[in-house]
Image (tube, grey):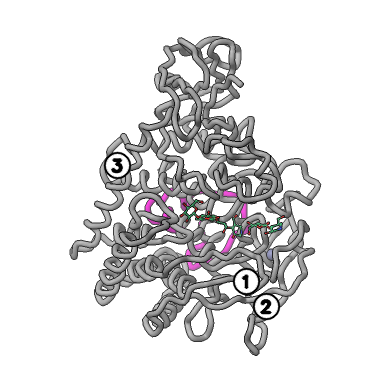
Amino acid sequence: MKNVYVNQVGFLENAEKKAVLNFKASDFSVKNEKGETVFSGAVKHFGTDDISGEDTYVADFSGLTKKGSYRIEADGVTSVKFGIGENIYDRLMKDVCKCFYYLRCGDALDKKYAGVYYHKPCHLSKATVYGEDVPPVDVTGGWHDAGDFGRYSTAGAVAVAHLLYAVRFYKSLLNVEFDIPKVPCDRGNLPDILAEVKVELDFLMKMQRENGSVWHKVTTFNHAPFVMPEDDREELFLFSVSSMATADIAAVFALAYTIYRDYDRKYAERLLSLSKKAYDWLLKNPEPLLFKNAKGSNTGEYGEAEDISNRFWAASALFEATGDASYVKDITEQKERLSKFDKKAKFKGYQGDVFTCLGWAEVAGLGALSLLLKNDDNGLTKEMKAHVIGEADRLCKVSKENGFGLPMARKDFIWGSNMELLKYMMILSVARDLTKNEAYGRVLGAGVDYILGCNSMDTSYVTGNGEKAFKNPHLRPTAVDDIEEPWPGLVSGGPNTGLQDERAKEVPKNSAPMKCYLDHVDCYSLNEITIYWNSPFVFVLAGLLK
Ligand code: G3I
Ligand code: 9MR
Ligand code: ZN
């Protein structure tokens, strides 16, 4: 089918603006709502590429800067509607942030804020400590991870980290209001983003054991059937402790301390002391304590091959939070271990530089962000800058290999490919801030366009944002709630050449990576949502709107 692919939400006035055509045309025009041509230009042939498999043509209309609502026309084919304006991403940003609220677990939802998407209190029973003869534990609260109702420590810590690093790098995120209950603090109310993040931090505190270690996850033994959260009443289990969870919590509590200390001194002090407690446990337990699902249990595993990147992140975040130079030795040690591991690794869950990986498994990039913020004089900051800029350069190179200008190669189209892209965009955003190199900004823009509809599926991967936004996430409440549309702002996992669920087999054989996608509720490997697919988009949008 002939298509004009374009960002379906739209563009900031001075941004680069491109659409991609999958058919031959010589020129194109942009029309306003009255059907008048306001811009026209020549189409540039790119050719075929490895990720879309399409013969692509690019229409550049960056010259159009006037606020308004438009469509593109080429050779009788018309695009969906999109906008141009300085506030074009404001609603999107609110929607993407508000999703965390709708995913709250426990008794935290309020009809006043959740409206039709309200659900009754859920998962309030105490959790059994799996395989141990100890009293059950209260671990209520936090956010459901995704389309399932599990709550996983490493995934939660990484989502929180994306949001809190966004606050550190882009202060204006503190002004974004998205209609959630107010939380009082030492100076009035917490900014909304910090009120929302506190929900998950409070839960993560409960996941820490007396000895400082952290349970890897709390879930039912198997995934719940498709029911509302309050109707999932199976026994909850706390599965074993892992060194990755303990390190991630040490890191994210230290990071949170640096922000909450300006709002709630007591809460911040508690975060720091729990961070140190987790870190002490790590020092006493230098061997990795990896995680495997209990026999017969099928909830998310979030397995990792090592815990080095997690320990590196923890030491870096504590160094940045406390200024205590005694962490430098640990940072250096873990850094060297990670470099060795990276060189030797046969199968990597990441492309590019391991020191720019931003989770859920490889988290060294989060450590790098802390070291950038630290701005130290013992060389670590400088070294991490070089990693970030080197990776951004690699991404720019990759972006030249496809008609969409995307920093994505075939190998990036795995389960949650949209997060692979969003993580790259976080790096490009930071690299742009460091260097003011606009080439990074352009690739970043192509990424935003892709997520919002400029892709071979002609689909906006954010619910409620775009004329052809995906509508059928693999998300239990949405699937059973009798409400036509899912709540807005959810980011889909996106195309995955692995096609790892039954329904995904319906994707035509040999489809190009970008087309390995179906907007179907059954497709958990293509169309689920998670907290850590929304969180990097908040970071990226905060960087754009700063
Ligand atoms: O690391 C390999 C890499 O070496 C290989 O080249 C590539 C090609 O397939 O795969 C890479 O591994 C993938 C891995 O994610 C790395 O991110 C696996 O194929 C893929 O199966 C795995 O997917 C994860 C999935 O759980 C299954 O374990 C997703 O990242 C992860 O987001 C997802 O998480 C689930 C939770 O378990 C439960 N809650 C929902 C959540 C989202 O679907
Ligand atoms: O719904 C589950 C989804 O959240 C997970 O990402 C996925 C992989 O862990 O598993 C889904 O649950 C499926 C289960 O693993 C097997 N039976 C079908 C379930 C979905 O309908
Ligand atoms: Zn719940």
x and y percentages locating residue 301 in the rendered image: 57, 65
Sequence-wise first label, 2 or 1 = 2
Query: Does the residue at mark 2 contact the one at mark 1 (Cβ under 8 Å)?
Result: yes
Mark 3 and 1 residues: CB-CB less than 8 Å, in contact? Answer: no
The residue nearer to you, when weighing 190 against 127, is: 127
The spot of residue 537 in percent (x, y) is: 49, 47
Q: Amino acid at mark 1?
A: Val
Q: Which numbered marker is on residue 127?
A: 2
Q: Which residue is mark 3?
A: 393
Name the mark nearer the viewer: 2 or 3.
3
Q: Is mark 1 within 8 Å of ligand 3?
A: no
- Mark 1 is surrounded, within 10 Å at the Cα level, by few (under 14), some (14 to 19) or many (20 or more) other residues, namely many
- Residue range (magenta): 164-191
Q: Earlier in the sequence, mark 2 or mark 3?
A: 2
Quarter of the render that holds ligand 2: bottom right
Residue 218's disc is 1
Residue depicted at 43% across the width and 49% down the height: 423
> Callout 3: helix, strand or loop?
helix
Secondary structure beneath label 1: strand
**Which residue lies at the image location 43% right of the left edge and 12% below the top edge?**
41
Q: CA distance from mark 2 to mark 3?
A: 47 Å
The secondary structure type at the circle numbered 2 is: loop
